Amino acid sequence: MSKLKRTCTCGQLRLKDVSSTIVLMGWVDSVRDHGGVIFIDLRDRDGITQVVFNPDAANKSYELAHQLRSEYVIGIRGKVAARPAGTINPDLATGEIEVIADELEIFNKSETPPFEIIDNSNVSLELRLKHRYLDLRRPEMQKHLVFRHKVCQVMREYFDGLGFIDIETPVLTKSTPEGARDYLVPSRVNQGKVYALPQSPQLFKQVLMVAGYDRYFQIVRCFRDEDLRAQRQPEFTQIDMEMSFVDESDIMQIIEGLIAAIFEKVVGKTINTPFPRLSYRESMVYYGCDAPDLRFDMKIQDVSYIVKESNFKVFLDAIKSGGQVRAINATGCGNYSRKEIDELTEFVGQFGAKGLAWFKVEETGLVSSITKFFPPEILQKIQQHMNAKTGDLLLFVADKEKVVSQSLAHLRVHLGHKNNLIDPVEFNFVWIVDFPLFEYSEDAKRYVALHHPFTSPRQEDLPLLEEKPLEARARAYDLVLNGVELGGGSIRIHSPEIQKRVFRLLGINDDEAYQKFGFLLDALKYGAPPHGGIALGVDRMIALLLHLDDIREVIAFPKTQKATCPMTEAPSEVDPQQLRELGIRLG
RNA sequence: GGGGCCGUAGCUCAAUUGGUUAGAGUACCAGACUGUCGAUCUGGACGUUGCGGGUUCGAGUCCCGUCGGCCUCGCCA
């Protein structure tokens, strides 16, 4: 073992430490060899300190220092000195001092790294993930993970302070129908049977409420075997909580307090609470989605009732077949070229829109190749309804509701970015409330739960359950930040009868319900308190708070889009013996 | 499962309509240099153009397939 013992880290030393003898350890960030004197930037996760090797001060160490290369791990002993006038580095926290080394020990050499350990490097993600231990050395990544740690600490303190207790729930659990595809783990002891990794601890936390553990929370890993996105990993982390004897406003208030605490203690900003609330219906009407970005306006307008008086077949056909025509006013975009509009058309095409009708607003009125299909008074009504001014561009999608909503929702956000309508440092929170309990699935040919099957209907909507299920509203709420769904929750069903009614409506008969969720239905029979909760995506939240658009930047060891890990090369083949013990065969 | 973009030196990229020996920056190696901090200067080394096939007198460039990465639709209670 080294005779050196570290006395401080690479970000600590200041002018007040001048002339004290210290020992630093860390990685060689860069070497500047001037022949007579060698400068080393020594890095650890706390910062960088300049170390000077001078032949006049310590010739032996100076000679050894010639061997130093990037990423060598070394320890040095030396005396802290004020930097000579004119050589102060204002970019370093330790820039007013340097350490004159008298002793150098090389703990380990390093091969030349496959990429430089610097911020702002635009190395491919694949290479970064393959050598994640090098990537994570970058100050930027260390900042992300430290930030994440601090947010999680605030979460724990906050919930602890309010009397919540942290309880772990199983990772090996039971596969449940509905929802995402499960990751499965075959059981060796029970051949032919499998565990599933939890998509969330939903049922366990409800059982904990029945057990009387009011106020539970957990920072917990969840697993969903679906295709990946920049915002979606197969395993991700939720801050999960559940409470008894509460209603929606209790949960929302506590979460608002949590967010406020995170902003105050970690982000260093104050955030206004309570957050605004928007009904699901309004959100769909004005923004075409249930996770609207409210940092800019540009609301969607329904013009079906106006354009049905026109002669434009595309619009008329859409309306006739039960669809609609809605539009957005791209304010000030009247100067868009044909090519730009074509690009927008192509853009909405990926959401199923068969076209994008447009009018440019000029002094003389609406101008477009389709103007001839619209009587002047209709054009005027459109212009008025859309509050269109000279220089604006009106964009229309005509189709069934889902296509129109989705196309315009994405188009709205696209234009918001394209036209710099979005303040990149704003944090805009909104609650979406009054969700329907069910929606009809064309694929499954049945009703499916919009939230999940344990969400309580509103008391006054109970009579609607069997008669008009699509009109029944859920006691659910989603928290949206800058157009991204952070998470959601609900007041749960605590009555076994209502839970059975909901299962039946979802096409899950009593036998099936007992087979899949028997333990929950049983638990509800033994004095289940009214309860509810919420879960928020931690990775997404951290990424948004750091203004990052890829959650892999805040996860230490994330997966690629094909759900592989370039570093460990997971998933991998296993020894045939392992498979035999499990009683399974692959491929 | 569908659509799109990409793959050239360790890294980031370039290479005219298919045309001579595939370049640059950086990293790396060697030498010089006692105040640099993106050190500088001089020199050097580094390529199965992801892989396989095809078209062609000739392919980094065109075609087909395949592997990998990214974005996206579907999917994600």
Image: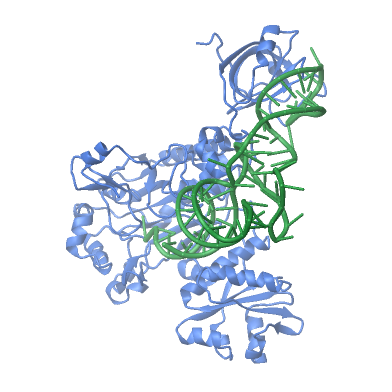
Closer to us: A50 or A266: A50
Q: Give the answer, above or below, for where A412 lies relative to B69.
A: below
Residue A175 screen position, x and y as percent = 27, 52
Please give left or right for residue A48 compared with residue A325 in the image. right
Residue A114 screen position, x and y as percent = 58, 34
Q: Quadrant of residue A44?
A: top right
Q: Give the answer, above or below, for where A72 lies relative to A417.
A: above
Q: In which quarter of the image is residue A118?
A: top right
Closer to us: A280 or A552: A552
Q: Give the answer, above or below, for where A419 lies relative to A573.
A: below
Chain ID, green in image: B
Closer to us: A148 or A442: A442
Residue A30 screen position, x and y as percent = 67, 26
Q: Give the answer, above or below, for where A326 lies relative to A564.
A: below
Residue A550 screen position, x and y as percent = 54, 49
Q: Tell me the shade of chain A.
A: blue
Please give left or right for residue A184 compared with residue A45 in the image. left
Please give left or right for residue B40 compared with residue A460 in the image. right
Colour scheme of the picture: by chain
At horizontal 62% and vertical 81% (from top left) the residue drawn is A385
At horizontal 37% and vertical 52% (from top left) the residue drawn is A225
